[in-house]
Amino acid sequence: MVELSHDSRPIIGRGPPLTAYFLTLAALSVGLMVADQRYQQIDRIRESLSRVIYPMQRAVDFPFRATDWVTGSFADRSRLRQENLALTTRLRLANLQLQRFAVLEEENRRLREMRANSAGIAEKVLVASILNVDLDPFRHRVLLDKGAADGVFKDQAVLDGDGIFGQVSKVNASTAEVILISDAEHAIPVQSNRSGVRTIAVGTGDQNKLSLPFVTVESDLQEGDLLLSTGMGGVFPPGYPVAQVSKVKRAGSTFALVEAKPTAKLDQAREVLLVWFKPPAEPAPVAGDKPPTPSSTPVEDSAAVAPPAQAGGE
Amino acid sequence: MFARRLLYWISMAAGLVLAIVPLPGWLDPFRPDLALLAMIYFVLTSPRIAGLGYAWLSGLFLDVLRGMVLGQHALGFLVVGYLTHKLQLRMRMFPIVQQAVIVMLLLGLYHFLMFWIDGLTGHSFTGWVRWLPVLSGALLWPLVVALGDSLTRRSS
């Protein structure tokens, strides 16, 4: 039971009038919320607060990392050998493909040079690990252990070994928050590898499902099609796998019901890549609504704004 | 007095840490707002130490921790803290079950506020799952009281 003890507020000298204090702080919170929605400067407050919070996040992450380390260092020999063998095989295969890739890349570069179009290929990557902290069960956000100190910027593309993972939504001093492509507030422009159909893949809140709401019944999409990033909007580098079409239902009269499964391992990845790349110079007359952005900060969520129907002449 | 203060901050930090510890998927929606429960407990037992400022600040830290709109949880904590302050003389007399019911109402109000602000800032999530912490928090209340009582008795 709660004790009815020594610390009840005395009748005389109650300290500051409670209601006035309450109203002041309430007004302050509302002001903060409005400012957070409107102005960038508030990020500085967030950043300084996040310095206080950082040890807590590390503390939560530590046991997981420690068990990882312990199981890693005491792994038995046969398992390590097996793993080693599997990795060697994969490396050999990858090297083989790489040889072909080098030739293709050279060819691609020459072709692009002919078109005077800079290739939107990753120029620099940084490996970041995902901290084991839970941000919000209803949103797909993760926290990386790299932040402004490492040069991470807002809207930076995040990839894992298998495809596009998400984009940086908030940058703190030594951590960064990433919104996954499966978050219900995220959208990414994609293109079918097989047919070249362009559309937008929207997150559903389910980590194994993206929805493609703007695909018409007539458009050429099939189950199994690989969807690649187009690079429109300047957030994501073009040509990286995003998802594989898992379901196409042409029931309605205008829009087909299309779902796709992200290729990146959104729920398993422990380490991801932060990517710096030069956005492709957009062919100015076609791309329309906004001038080709140079390397500076891209517009927020511009991925979602990119018009789907500009099937252009690629 | 100092020991109380320290205890308050430590339990607040613990509550905040528990707010971001990864839980297995099925348990995740049930995650009780332990930082909020700790705040209510301390406002009830030592209202002169655990004032509105404390409540507001811990809410603000939770905002940063979870990457929410700055001020969202701060406002929620503040409202709950204020109401607890207003109700504390009555609430202390209640048997534990009745207290738990009041706590459930406070938690309900808190989550309604969060739901409302989420909607205003365009992050709305309308599933019924988001109301589960109200239930789990109320069920945990007797435990929080027992734990808090044993800790404060040792520290004072």
Image (cartoon, coloured by chain):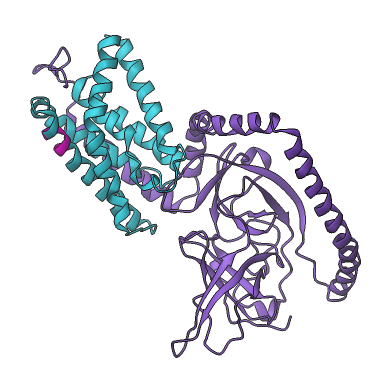
Chain colours: A purple, B cyan
In-image side of A245 versus B110 (left or right):
right
Residue A217, percent from left and from top:
52, 88
Name which quarter of the figure residue A7 lies in. top left
In-image side of B67 versus B117 (left or right):
right
Q: How many marks?
A: 0
Residue at (27, 41) in percent of width and height: B136
Q: Is residue A141 above or below residue A222?
A: above
Residue at (46, 50) in percent of width and height: A39
Furthest residue to the front? A78
Q: From where the camera sits, is residue B49 visible? A: no
Q: Is residue A115 above or below residue A39?
A: below
**Quarter of the N terminus of chain B within the rendering:** top left
Residue B45, percent from left and from top:
20, 21
Q: Main secondary structure of the magenta part?
A: helix
**Quarter of the C terminus of chain B within the rendering:** top left
Residue nearest the viewer, comparing A46 with B62: B62
Residue A259, percent from left and from top:
52, 73
In-image side of B155 versus A97 (left or right):
left
Magenta stretch, residue numbers:
B98-102
Q: From where the camera sits, is residue B134 visible? A: yes
- Magenta-drawn stretch contains A166: no
Residue at (70, 79) in percent of width and height: A194
Name which quarter of the figure residue A205 lies in. bottom left
Q: Is residue B70 above or below residue A189?
A: above
Residue at (89, 66) in percent of width and height: A100
Residue A302, percent from left and from top:
56, 65
